[in-house]
Amino acid sequence: MNQSVKDKLKKIVGSQNFLDSEEDKKVYSYDATALLNQKPEAIIFPDDEEQISQVVKLANSESFNIVPRGSGTGLSGGAVPVENCVLLVMTKWNKILEIDTKNHTATVQPGVITARFQQEVEKHGLFYPPDPGSMNICTLGGNVANNAGGLRGLKYGVTKNYVLGSEMILPNGDLLKTGGKNMKDVAGYNLKDFIVGSEGTLGIITKIIFKLVPKPTDSITILAYFDKLLDSANSVAGIIEKNIIPCMMEFLDHTTINCIEDYTHVGLPRNSEAILLIEVDGRGSAVADDARIIKEILSKNNASTIKVASDPQEALNLKTARRSAFSALARRRPTTILEDATVPRSELPVMIEKITEASRKFNLTFGDFGHAGDGNLHPTCLTDERDKDEITRAHKAFDFIFNEAINLGGTITGEHGTGLAKKQFLEGVAGIPGINMMRQIKSVIDPNNIINPGKVFDISPKCESYLPTDRK
Ligand SMILES: Cc1cc2nc3c(=O)[nH]c(=O)nc-3n(C[C@H](O)[C@H](O)[C@H](O)COP(=O)(O)OP(=O)(O)OC[C@H]3O[C@@H](n4cnc5c(N)ncnc54)[C@H](O)[C@@H]3O)c2cc1C
């Protein structure tokens, strides 16, 4: 990108909202995904829709790329810069514009941090359930772009279940408005849902309207330890079979338990093969009934210890410990590759075995944890990117894991998105007609391929050079 284009960008967003020092470019060269990084040409923090629209028009006329970014916590490389790009960061857009207690909706800017939003709506007796493990740092815009899930997905669903409407600057600079506060709206194609999960490839989200639900009044948090991994997986199946839907049913394997304990010292049992962290919520006695049945199922499946959190603080400590799983595992080795293979719930025991098999077969250390009730596992390879042989084995292990997930009727990503990291596997899930349709849609909306090119399904040559050779 030449200086005259940079000067034009500065003129649009103001020099205070423009960075291009080598240090800044390095800092913004990656997101939370291991192994992928590329420096942008510049980083901008636009103030309003008009500035974004002008930047997009400039990108079309001057042939540079734009990569939208929230907090950069993505785990599939969605916000990793591409060649000749400006990174457009939305963290300044951090206002909660309205909490509408009559309609149970909230209107927000996309840079609002997820946990802050949850705290604010809860002050009104309302509840925004999607709670990614990264909720203290990620943005709602990133959540919408990736259709983020979380610990409460089993009962409450994921981000898409709460998006009622949005605004987005399209690749031609127009402002697209979709949806609104209506609980029902079937006018025309469902563009609102189409934007959710578009991974920053269709435009820049500038406003979101969320549905809220009443805050549950009661909850019980249960922790169960297992000597055998398979018993924990069978417990998950047993609970679902009884038609009980906890709001949370999280699984941690032996390696993850020990890394979390090293990190948080909450008293997790170091010898256990697996732990389930389960929470039931709702109103009144139904919550206690569900908890009683769950404890019976856990006993039948040989849980060695079943503990009920004695108070909200203990429950919060346990959930906070669980949310630290990625950070805790990341302390063990220099490079942490975390994935999110997902299978139909009934296949969870098989998938857990397959991950163990991958670890043995390719001689690697894996921690495994995840949203067991959703069949959404996070096999996490603890490795060192300086060891080329180990990285090659890690890639082979993930190829094996993804293929096994697909064979079990599962998918390559339950919540992190395809981004850069998993685009080579997309065909196995979406099929060639599916990928072709995605490419056709993208080429109509973004004919010059300037918004986050090279991601999800895009194999345009201009964006391939920065992928590791065995990941092309
Ligand atoms: C410790 C840890 C735990 C995590 N736990 C979970 C979890 O439980 N569930 C889960 O789903 N994910 C989880 N993630 C992944 C990540 O936090 C989510 O994908 C999150 O939604 C990303 O938000 P972000 O603001 O960081 O977005 P970024 O990483 O900045 O961007 C993600 C994608 O969204 C696009 N984007 C961002 N903002 C906009 C915008 N305004 N307009 C258009 N496109 C935009 C980017 O281009 C990119 O493709 C975790 C990550 C970490 C590091």
Image: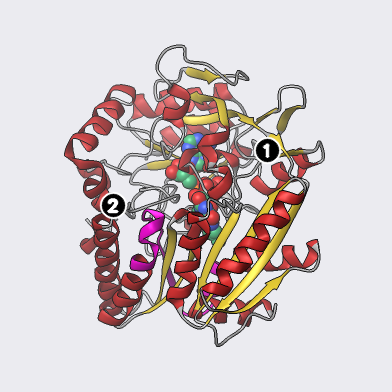
Does the magenta run of residues contain 327?
yes
- What residue is shown at x 40% (from left), y 25% (from top)? 171
- Residue assigned mark 1: 94
- Near mark 1 (Cα within 10 A), the count class, few <14, some 14-19 or many ≥20, is some
Q: Position of residue 124 (x, y in %)?
A: 81, 36
Disc 2 versus disc 1: nearer the observer = 2
| Residue sitting nearer the eye, 169 or 228 | 228
Relative placement, left or right, of 403 versus 412 is left
Q: Is residue 29 visible?
A: no
Relative placement, left or right, of 328 versus 427 is right
- Near mark 2 (Cα within 10 A), the count class, few <14, some 14-19 or many ≥20, is few
Q: Amino acid at mark 2?
A: Gly
Q: Is mark 2 within 8 Å of ligand 1?
A: no
Q: Position of residue 10 (x, y in %)?
A: 53, 33
The boundaries of the magenta stretch are 324-350
| Quadrant of the frame with the C terminus | bottom left
Element type at marker 1?
loop
The correct choice, above or below, for 459 with respect to 339 in the image is above
| Residue sitting nearer the eye, 212 or 64 | 212
Q: Position of residue 263 (x, y in %)?
A: 63, 78
Asked if the residue under mark 1 is in contact with the one under mark 2, i.e. CB atoms within 8 Å, the reply is: no
Instruction: Determine the image quadrant of residue 229.
Output: bottom left
- What residue is shown at x 58% (from left), y 77% (from top)? 225
Instruction: Determine the image quadrant of residue 379.
Output: bottom left
